[in-house]
Image (cartoon, rainbow, N blue to C red):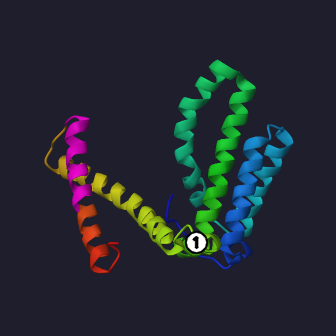
Amino acid sequence: MIGVFHPGTSLVHRAPALLKLGLLTLIVTVVAMAPSPIVLGAASVLVIVLVAVARIPLRLAWSQVVPILWVLAVAVPVQVLFGGWEAAAVMAVRLVLAVALAAVYTLTTPVTATLDAMQALLRPFRRWVDADRVGLALALTIRCVPLLADLVREVLEARRARGAEGSLTALAVPVIVRALRTADHLGEALTARGFDD
């Protein structure tokens, strides 16, 4: 989900990233704190309205929510066992809403706008925090998540091409070695650009 952006000219797309981040934080906090079905229902309607206003294709919006369903397949039965059906239902709706709201944000906001918003948010604290370095760290984190996923995919494809099946260790070792090499190259590139202090 990270780094996904669906271009558009809707009101949601044009809203400032800092405003969207603030509203996302506020709404997710309200959803997490309020067990009321009315609040959860209102948040559900809000998500549907935002998806419609942003003109996000339903298939794309659904693909952002699907991964959390695998988590819920395990978490809901456990919650039913310890807290009952009502608690499990509330927990499931809260998680789906939080992921859906985050998906609306990522689908309507470029990563660069998010980084600029974070830097603007941290500038008043420049005496204690270097906003530019935090922005760089955030950009590297966002870039490295899909990069690591690509490394895992490449190792899996190489193993399949050789007809190799094996343990988790046989997968993890080449992924870790390649990730460390990539980190070394990244560190050298940053040092060459003066980010070594």
Q: Is residue 1 left or right of residue 153?
A: right
Name which residue type carries label 1.
Arg
Residue furthest left as drawn? 162
Q: Is residue 149 left or right of residue 177?
A: right
Give me the residue at 73% from left, 49% from top: 29
* In the image, residue 23 above or below residue 96: below
Q: Is residue 18 visible?
A: yes
Residue 54 in view in this figure: no
Neighbour tally class for label 1: few under 14, some 14-19, many 20 plus, Cα within 10 Å: few
Task: Based on the picture, tell me whether residue 178 belongs to the magenta stretch.
Answer: yes
Q: Which residues are magenta?
A: 166-181
Q: Nearer the viewer, residue 148 or 126?
A: 126
Q: Give the residue at x 56% y 54%.
A: 64
Residue 31 vs residue 38, the one in the foreground: 31
For residue 183, which quarter of the picture?
bottom left
Which residue lies under the disc numbered 1? 127
- Work out which quarter of the rendered image holds the C terminus and state it: bottom left
Reply above or below: 194 against 155.
below
Q: Quadrant of residue 148?
A: bottom left
Q: Residue 112, position in %: x, y?
A: 53, 75
Note whether 103 is above or below 19 in the view shown: above
- Expressed as whole percent of the image width and height from the top left, the position of residue 76 reads 61, 29
Residue plotted at (29% across, 56% down): 151
